[in-house]
Amino acid sequence: MTVISSKKDLAALRMTIVAEFDATIERVWQIWADPRKLERWWGPPTWPATFARHDFTVGGESRYFMTGPEGEKAPGWWRMTAIDGPHSLEFDDGFAGEDGEPDPAMPTIHAAVALEASGAKTRMSIVSTFATTEQFEQVIEMGMEEGMTEAMGQIDAILTEG
């Protein structure tokens, strides 16, 4: 598996997941930039994602939904806040209503992704920051840590393709 560590820090309201890949930083960057590649790993294997919009620019927004094993839909959104390809990106990540628009009753998570090249390998860190302890506990209870770990476990197959 590609994930090498996962750490929850309730005091700092942060969860950090670190993975390492046998691929160049440019190839790993593409799993974020290309919505068709992103669809293949964003979401656990039993909840694949479909990106209806992916405006990969600062200020740009993405709209997606994950489809569960029984056909249920879990919509979400991103708003890009910083992009420095191929080294880092940041975005706000939240839950959406059935219309695909942000649901203000649900938590918004700030995600900071850092890619670091080490020869032919790339280390990727995703730091998720929460606004409150309650929001942090809510998404952990919903299975975010396990879901992200499973999702990131799908990346190697994408990176080994020609």
Image (cartoon, grey):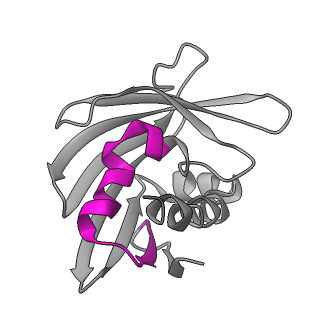
Question: Which residue sits at x=40%, y=52%?
Answer: 131
* Viewport quadrant of the N terminus: bottom right
Which residue occupies the extreme front position in the image? 162
Q: Is residue 31 magenta?
A: yes
Query: Where residue 121 appears, x then y in whole percent?
Result: 33, 81
Q: Residue at x 19, y 64 (%)?
A: 87
Residue 26: percent from left, percent from top: 24, 62
Give the magenta part as a residue range: 13-38
Q: Residue at x 43, y 65 (%)?
A: 13
Q: Nearer the viewer, residue 111 or 122?
A: 122
Counting every numbered tag in the picture gives 0
Q: Residue at x 56, y 54 (%)?
A: 134
- Direction top: furthest residue: 99
Query: Where in the figure is residue 7, as x and y percent of width and height?
Result: 51, 79
Q: Could you tell whether 152 is left or right of 127 in the image? A: right
| 110 sits to left or right of 103 | left
Q: Quadrant of the C terminus?
A: bottom left
